[in-house]
Amino acid sequence: MTDHELKQLVYDFFFAFSRLEFALKAAGFRRRDRNDAAQPDWAAFIRKHQGHYQLSNGDNKLLRSPPKRQCLDRKNRLVWKDLVFESGDSSLKKVSLILRTIRNNLFHGGKYGHRSWDDPKRVTFLLQNGLESIDCLKETDSKVKRIFNM
């Protein structure tokens, strides 16, 4: 994959992810943060759909090989840790956490300084499967799908 193609894939992921969060809020899956800003309510979306969500091929691939999360160690240094799921987490909750982690790692600079984010094949894997997951998530709710596709 060329540098240009990878940049296009990053753009496509950001566009689809932001469109999904917009659609969630517009479809009523929204919450107020402590400063009254509207936030997507992933937890409400997950509660409504976790019982019937069908994993996509991309979801399954991401669940088998999720991204790491950038954290701070006890000495306040940046470190990479495995994404941790709670024992009772639904597949839908895990997929949404993976997608948000991919987005955060890209947006907040986590794509540099760790071998998996400096590896174009790994980034391509995460972004391509993430795009497939976003497509599957939007299909889960008819109102979200309609707004996403407007």
Image (cartoon, helix red, strand yellow):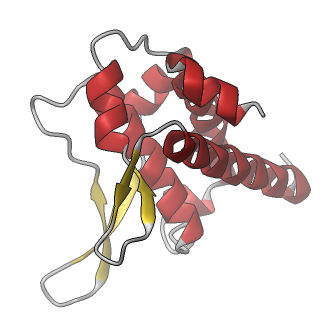
The residue closer to the viewer here, 66 or 130, is 130
Instruction: Name the image quarter holding residue 128.
Output: top right
Q: Where is residue 14 in the image (x, y as percent from the top left)?
A: 67, 53
Q: Where is residue 90 in the image (x, y as percent from the top left)?
A: 24, 25
Q: In the rendered view, tell whether residue 119 sits above or below residue 88.
A: below
Q: Can residue 59 be seen in this view?
A: yes
The residue closer to the viewer here, 148 or 16, is 148
**Measuring 28% from the left and 49% from the top, which residue is drawn there?**
83
Q: Can residue 121 be seen in this view?
A: no
Q: Is residue 141 left or right of residue 12?
A: left
Q: In which quarter of the image is the C terminus?
A: top right
Residue sticking out furthest to the bottom: 75
Q: Where is residue 66 in the image (x, y as percent from the top left)?
A: 40, 41
**Measuring 49% from the left and 63% from the top, which residue is drawn there?**
105
Q: How many marks?
A: 0
Q: In this view, does 58 lie to the left or right of 64?
A: right
Q: In the rendered view, tell whether residue 92 sits above or below residue 53.
A: below
Q: Where is residue 130 in the image (x, y as percent from the top left)?
A: 58, 37
**Measuring 18% from the left and 31% from the top, which residue is drawn there?**
89
Q: In the rendered view, tell whether residue 111 sits above or below residue 137.
A: below
Q: Is residue 75 left or right of residue 14?
A: left
Q: Quadrant of the N terminus?
A: top right
**Measuring 48% from the left and 62% from the top, which residue is drawn there?**
104
Q: In this view, does 61 lie to the left or right of 150?
A: left
Q: In the rendered view, tell whether residue 60 sits above or below residue 70.
A: above
